[in-house]
Image: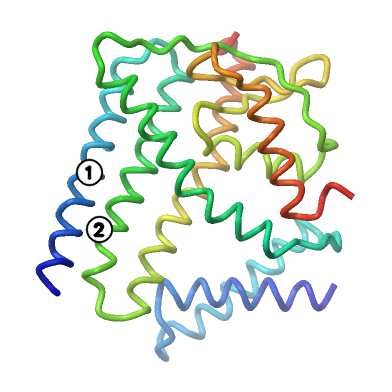
Amino acid sequence: MSLLADGVTILCVLAGLVFFAAGTVGLLRFPDTASRLHALTKADHLGLGLVVLGLLPQMDSLAGILRLLAFWALVLLASAATGPMIARLLRRQGGIT
Amino acid sequence: MGGAGLIRFGLLLLLWIAIAGAGPPTLPVGMVAAALGAWVSLALLPPVGRRTRPVECAALVLRFPVQALRAGIEVARLALDPRRRPAPATIAWTPRLPPGPARDAFLAYASLLPGTLPAGEMADGAIAIHALDGSAGVAAAMTAEEARFARAFGLDD
């Protein structure tokens, strides 16, 4: 049982790291600032979500599970609030045409 | 007013307990923080008496991980495949929701969906949507998501 849990953890966390890496590659490679925002937010959200998912089987209490899920929700909330704000500022300054 | 404040206080306190635990050293701090949070939220976002629809709301929440997966895979493929490059475009999209907190909430939510990033209002009242792939049906997808969002939070009546 713990072997299965460890397997899920390793798979999910590795997949999460792939998406974090992809987000960083996008940040370097995408042509404009707004596209880089897409790379940073979307790929990293999925990466963090997979890392959280992978760590869930390692938690020994419901409190730990809720704490991990709350972290993901808070990051999503912060990003949903700031992403459009940065995009709006960019457009006002002519960065998005 | 008092009811909405109590509900928000309760939800914030639950979030605090989920993160920090309910032990004696943290709980009093959490109660103060939740009370402050509820007070600020009432000032910034007064209750409007909308009726959320639990089933549609749950569907929206359950759909979200799938959307996050689609969005992440799309960005990762664009970033990692050397033959592909993003073809970004800004699209004018006219929302159905009237200007106000509900529309702002939907636009914040839409920034988490695959390929779309709202970038503020244009001169004619439309919303500028920055899309990673300008050729996809971005405006139609936004309208469909808006309808789902409006149904879940009872904004469409």
Q: Is residue B91 above or below residue A38?
A: above
Q: Is residue A81 left or right of residue A19?
A: right
Residue B28: horizontal and vertical position, in percent? 51, 85
Q: Is residue B127 left or right of residue A28?
A: right
Q: Is residue B85 left or right of residue B14?
A: left
Residue occupying the far bottom of the picture: B24
Marks 2/1 in contact by CB < 8 Å: the verdict is yes
Looking at the rendered structure, the kind of residue marked 1 is Ala
Secondary structure beneath dot 2 equals helix
Callout 2: residue from which chain?
Answer: A
Mark 1, chain letter?
A
Residue sitting nearer the eye, B50 or B64: B64
Residue that mark 2 sits on: A54
Q: Does B115 sit above or below residue B52?
A: above
Q: Residue at x 45, y 17 (%)?
A: A33
Residues at discs 2 and 1 both on one chain:
yes
Indicate the position of residue B128 as horizontal and vertical percent values.
67, 20
Q: Callout 1: helix, strand or loop?
A: helix
Quarter-of-image position of residue B35: bottom right
Instruction: Tell me: residue B99, above or below residue A6.
Output: above
Residue at image point 54% right, 11% down: B135
User: Coloring scheme of the render?
Assistant: rainbow
Q: Which residue is mark 1?
A: A15
Measured as percent of width and height from the top left, residue A74 is found at 47, 55
Labels 2 and 1: the sequence-earlier one:
1
Specify few, some or many for label 1: CA neighbours under 10 Å numbering under 14, 14-19, or 20 or more.
some
